[in-house]
Image (cartoon, rainbow, N blue to C red):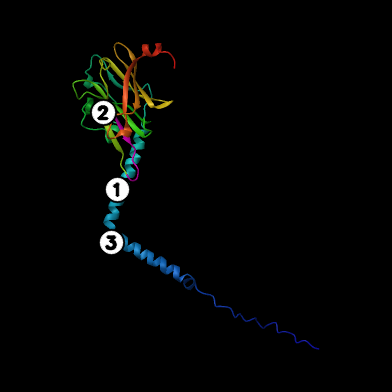
Amino acid sequence: MTRTAGNPNVQQLDYGRPTLSFWRRHRTALLIILAVLLFAAGYVFSNRRTLILRFEAKRRLWEDRRRYYETAAETAPADHLVFDAPMDRRIVDAPVDPPGRWELLWSNRRYSSPNTREPLLFQHEMTTASGMRVLVAVQWDDSTNQRQLIATMLRPGTLSRHPLPYGPFVIFIDDGTLTKPLRLFAGQIDPNDDHHFTIRYQNARESGVLDGRLVEEPGATTYREFGTIRMSRIPDAQADSAPAR
């Protein structure tokens, strides 16, 4: 029996399906993508004014939120002299810090004071009695017949709401503390309790702190979550003689 030697030059025929182009293999998906893009382009074109306004609104919300945290970052050390009224100078002529972000962005303009702006005595993020984080600012005010300190709370904004201010409201009415010669230093938050802060003062009789605390406001019908601020005067001699807690 003899074998017939195969011809090495004969190639195997390929009877499989022909290779499809990229377009034919992905035609359905590409048509769907094209239809979606055309629909999106038509929607944008027909609603361009609404979309621009919506974008601008979101941009303003984002800017307000950024300004809030930039303002909250502006703090001063405890030895920083904020207000200095010697005997030979009128209270209204007392030198104060130049207006910072709080005065420029968030301060209520209906109050008048030295240099047309209240000196900012305290500014810090704190927690209200209800647990809400707010930016608290305390300012000098002599727009009435008596000197007093006013406070404003500012709730941070989100991408769906602007920052919400509460106040200003009076937290301390002068009991003889705010008389010349008077020096007020930058207020400081209690590192162990962010419901509590102090503002150091010096006058002709004594030195001490104005002690502030964020507490609930039982009688509030609106803005209840902000609560209020209770402030009292604690002379250094009294603080030194008080028993340790």
Say whether residue 168 is visible: yes
Residue 188 vs residue 230, the one in the foreground: 230
Magenta region: 150-160
Q: Residue furthest bottom?
A: 1
Q: From the viewer's perspective, tell me whether residue 21 is left or right of residue 145.
A: right
Amino acid tagged 1: Ala
Secondary structure beneath label 3 = helix
**Residue 45 position within the rendered picture, expressed as x and y whole percent measured from the top left:** 29, 61
**Residue 121 position within the rendered picture, expressed as x and y whole percent measured from the top left:** 31, 25
**Label 1 sits on residue:** 57
Q: Residue at x 35, y 27 (%)?
A: 214
User: What is the C-alpha distance between the residues marked 3 and 1?
Assistant: 19 Å
In the rendered structure, does residue 157 fall within the stretch colored magenta? yes
Earlier sequence position, callout 2 versus callout 1: 1
Amino acid tagged 2: Phe
Secondary structure beneath label 2 = strand
**Residue 236 position within the rendered picture, expressed as x and y whole percent measured from the top left:** 36, 13
Front position among marks 2 and 1: 2
**Label 2 sits on residue:** 169
**Label 3 sits on residue:** 46
How many labels sit on residues? Answer: 3
Q: Which mark is residue 2?
A: none
- Classify residue 120 by image quadrant: top left
Amino acid tagged 3: Ser
In the rendered structure, does residue 182 fall within the stretch colored magenta? no
Residue 70 vs residue 151, the one in the foreground: 151
Report if the CB atoms under discs 3 and 1 are less than 8 Å apart: no
Q: Residue at x 35, y 25 (%)?
A: 213
> Label 3 crowding class (10 Å Cα cut-off): few <14, some 14-19, many 20+?
few
